[in-house]
Amino acid sequence: MDYGLIGEKLGHSYSKIIHEKLADYQYDLRPLAPDELDSFMLAKDFKAINVTIPYKQEVIPYLDELHPHAKEIGAVNTIVNRDGKLYGFNTDYYGFLYMIEHNNIEIKDKKCLVLGNGGAAKAVIAVLKQLQAKNILLVSRRKSEETITYDECMQKHSDAQIIVNTTPVGMYPDIDNSPINLNNFHSCEAVLDIIYNPIKTKLTLQAEEKNIKALTGLEMLIAQAKKAVEYFLDIKLDDAVMEKIYEDLIKTLQ
């Protein structure tokens, strides 16, 4: 494999379609069981890869160098092999920033809930901090020093204005589930679900019913892929390519 994506389950992925529209190479999907990750990373038998759930943090010990954003976030979703040395980047950061800015979501001085505490959540939090969110609360099934529980979230933080889902709850084929019920969130202005398959999740459909601005993650996926291609090939792509790919995919998927 020269270029591609590794992760545990990749049946939901649109990355092959997007990368092959962005660049002139074959992009392969390579599912890896947890016990296969070590041998794959040590072999370094690739030019550049993307990394998805659940390996965005697990790949870091295999890397020779981390981009400052990836180091700050603590998660990697893009790896480039340069003469046997592995360089790690985080393009989720750019993808989520694009998603917010392209849709004019106001983050400054807002109370934000981030559902989930995996690698994608770390990139989301970095963007929300950059955009000067007033409060950022990380919501997880287990309470820790960094997280609150869903029960605590519902009881004490129903005044949240921005809700971001970074969990896989609601992702194909689990489309009938939602990570949270929006009924108590009367101050909510926007729901951002980074899931991109389905195009509308149960969470964003509920948001739309309540006249809350709702976005899923297809734009983020395309934007992070565009940035990944730039790292893969050491080139610069025009931002206009993202809107064209988004329009083409929406026509195909609806």
Image (cartoon, rainbow, N blue to C red):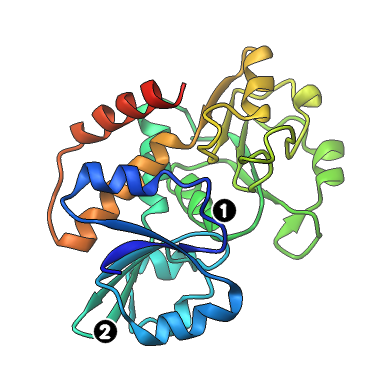
Q: Position of residue 237 (x, y in %)?
A: 15, 45
Q: Which quadrant of the figure has residue 118?
A: bottom right
- As drawn, 249 above or below 82: above
User: Under tag 2, what secondary structure?
Assistant: strand
Q: CA distance from mark 2 to mark 1?
A: 27 Å
> Mark 2 packing: few (<14 Cα in 10 Å), some, or many (20+)?
few
Sequence-first disc among 2 and 1: 2
Q: Position of residue 139 (x, y in %)?
A: 72, 50
Q: What residue is shown with label 2? A: 85
> Mark 1 packing: few (<14 Cα in 10 Å), some, or many (20+)?
many
**Which mark's residue is nearer the viewer, 2 or 1?**
2
Q: Amino acid at mark 1?
A: Ala
Q: Position of residue 90 (x, y in %)?
A: 38, 60
Compared across the picture, whether 29 is left or right of 171 comes to left
Q: Amino acid at mark 2?
A: Lys
Q: Residue at 83% x, 39% y: name it.
A: 156
Compared across the picture, whether 102 is left or right of 110 comes to left
In the image, 10 versus 246, the foreground residue is: 10
Q: Which quadrant of the figure has residue 113?
A: top right
In the image, 248 versus 59, the foreground residue is: 248
Q: Residue at 58% x, 41% y: name it.
A: 134
Q: What residue is shown with label 1? A: 121
